[in-house]
Image (cartoon, helix red, strand yellow):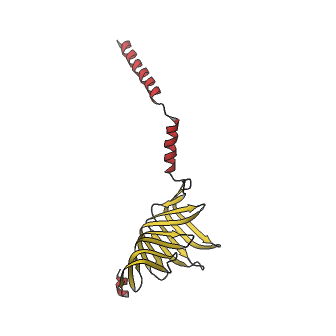
Amino acid sequence: MVNLFFKKINFIFTFLFFVSLFSCENNIDEVNLVTSVSQQNLPNESVKNVEIIYSDSARVRAKLKSVELNRYSTAKKPYMEMPKGLEVVFFNEHRKQQTKLTANYGIGHENGNNIQTMEVKNKVVVINEKGEMLETEHLIWNTLTKKIYTDEFVKITTKDEILMGNGLEAEQDFSEYEIKNVKGRIAVKDEELNKK
């Protein structure tokens, strides 16, 4: 009786072993497709608490800081992403801070080893050396033309007034700007601005 029991168990294990052998066949093309797709979604480099210096003619022009930076250099169009936000400080020729830009998300589109455009989103704030503040939800910085622009709603607060409109083009240091479609202009007293 015991012998019969062990024979049945032995038969069941042998049967399951052969079933598992023949049922675990993978198509190598399918495996390669799955692994290549998953690798495309992963960054080639991932860095925490990064600081990048941008220079022009051996002069520091901007400094970028981010809590997390992911670079996708093998993508069809290489890019780097800052999913947890960024801060960019622009400097003049005397290395004095001119402008500060902050945003909750950023993506830089690369051309070779250089960033050609930086797109920032979600609570974008730009403050220039005059204390003028730009607020918007989407802004693009073109490093070649040294311009920042958007087609979305913008609010600019100066010491004298608040300007609102849709669309903006400005110098990267936000020293000069033009709102494309002004929607409102509010005169503000210094005391009211200081209460904010």
Q: Is residue 73 left or right of residue 190?
A: right
Q: Is residue 195 above or below residue 116?
A: below
Residue lying at 39% horizontally and 16% vertically, measured from the top left: 6
Give residue 179's quadrant in the image. Answer: bottom left
Residue at image point 49% right, 42% down: 34
Tell me residue 136's x, y (percent).
Answer: 41, 72
- Residue 160 on image: x %, y %: 40, 86
Q: Residue shown at 36%/88% (left/top)? A: 189
Viewer-side residue, 51 vs 82: 82
Reply above or below: 36 against 11.
below
User: Which residue is nearer to you in this view: 52 or 170?
Assistant: 170
Residue 146 in percent (x, y) is at: 55, 73
Asked whether 113 or 150 is in front, the reply is: 150
Q: Position of residue 33 (x, y in %)?
A: 50, 42
- Which residue corresponds to the image point at 49% horizontal and 60% vertical from the top-left? 81
Quarter of the figure with the N terminus: top left
Q: Residue furthest front?
A: 181
